[in-house]
Amino acid sequence: MTSPAAPAAPRLLDQVRLAMRVRHYSLRTEATYVGWVRRFVLFSRKRHPRELGEAEVAAFLSHLANEGGVSASTQTQALSALLFLYREVLRMRVGWLDGVARARQPERLPVVLTRDEARAVIGRMQGSSRLAATLLYGSGLRLLECLTLRVKDIDFDRLQLTVRRGKGAKDRVTMLPQVVIPALRRHLEQVRELHYRDLAEGEGAVVLPGAFERKAAGAPTEWVWQWVFPAARRYLEPRSGRRRRHHLHESVVQRAVKQAVRDAGLSKRATCHTFRHSFATHLLEDGYDIRTVQELLGHRDVSTTMIYTHVLNRGGLGVRSPLDRR
């Protein structure tokens, strides 16, 4: 009798996916890294990355910058994907990758809205998008941090929000504005009704972080784990094959903010992230300590927060123009 054939080794991209899932990377990051690995292999004429080295990686990154016209941050993202491929998937010692030239990030000042401009934009929005934009400005959240809030992350009594796995996979606590509480409570009542309808139809489950779902089988349908901003439609979760409800997609809020900025007649190129910049700048204008603002924003280094001192109305050094002297 012939012995059974050995199972075929997983394809390279499948190995990348498996390595990322073992390390609990998000689906978004997984798709991004797999995309960069695929582009690298195609650029190298489908040669296996084991056969390639520093010259090929450098050529690929140069191609992205020169022919592709990508930004410095995008080029750095591609390099991070290749670092993960060689170190975590292929288990190769690639100290030479540390020497590959990284594109330098240009130093740009953030766009900041005045208080009246922020209110004007939010006032021209409706529904869930308006509430999300209010939290972006009132709590200093990034857009995805806001949309991935769960019911349990809101503490009305202590007036605070807990951001789970923010940038750098860090948790942090930030403020919950009192003025938003009535609208937020009404919104949660509507979300609860939607959740009860899902449960009645045998659905009502959300994705849980890490391996928690295996430890607490009933948790995906519990109220406390539901998204504060659920999507209108359910979807088929690719990893488990189960129907679930995702959080609201970022593009919904992004489009609403873009239209509101246009309707408000602003000459600034404001986006969802502009609300976070405005939050930090206005706190500093009000005299709050920069270390406090750093903690609220979740910056690892205070130097990142320092950029907002350069866009204050009074100037970074409090310098007054000679034309304003009498």
Image (tube, rainbow, N blue to C red):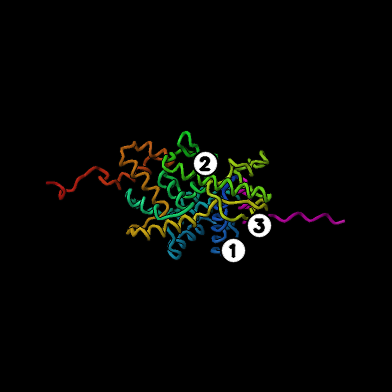
Q: Marks 1 and 3: in contact by CB < 8 Å?
A: no
Q: Is residue 321 left or right of residue 268?
A: left
Residue 85 visible, this angle: no
Q: Kindly report which numbered mark, 3 or 1, lies closer to the viewer in this rendering.
A: 3
Distance between the Cα atoms at labels 2 and 1? 39 Å
Distance between the Cα atoms at labels 3 and 1? 13 Å
Q: What residue is rendered at 42% in x and 48% in y? A: 134
Q: Marks 1 and 2: in contact by CB < 8 Å?
A: no
Q: Nearer the viewer, residue 268 or 71?
A: 268
In the image, residue 65 sits, relative to residue 319, either above or below, namely below
The image quadrant of residue 65 is bottom left
Residue type at the position of mark 3: Arg
Q: Kindly report which numbered mark, 2 or 1, lies closer to the viewer in this rendering.
A: 2
Distance between the Cα atoms at labels 3 and 2? 33 Å
Label annotation for residue 283:
none
Disc 2 marks which residue? 164
Circle 3: element type: loop
The tag earlier along the polypeptide, 3 or 1, is 3
Residue type at the position of mark 1: Lys
Label annotation for residue 11:
3
| Residue 14 counted in the magenta span | yes
Estimate the x, y position of residue 212 in percent, counting from the top left.
63, 40
Assign the N terminus to one quadrant of the image. Answer: bottom right
Q: Kindly report which numbered mark, 3 or 2, lies closer to the viewer in this rendering.
A: 2
Q: What residue is rendered at 58% in x and 51% in y? A: 246
| Residue 159 counted in the magenta span | no
**What span is in magenta?**
1-22
Disc 1 marks which residue? 46
Mark 2 nearby-residue class (10 Å; few <14, some 14–19, many ≥20): some
Residue type at the position of mark 2: Arg
Q: Is residue 103 left or right of residue 90?
A: left
The tag earlier along the polypeptide, 2 or 1, is 1
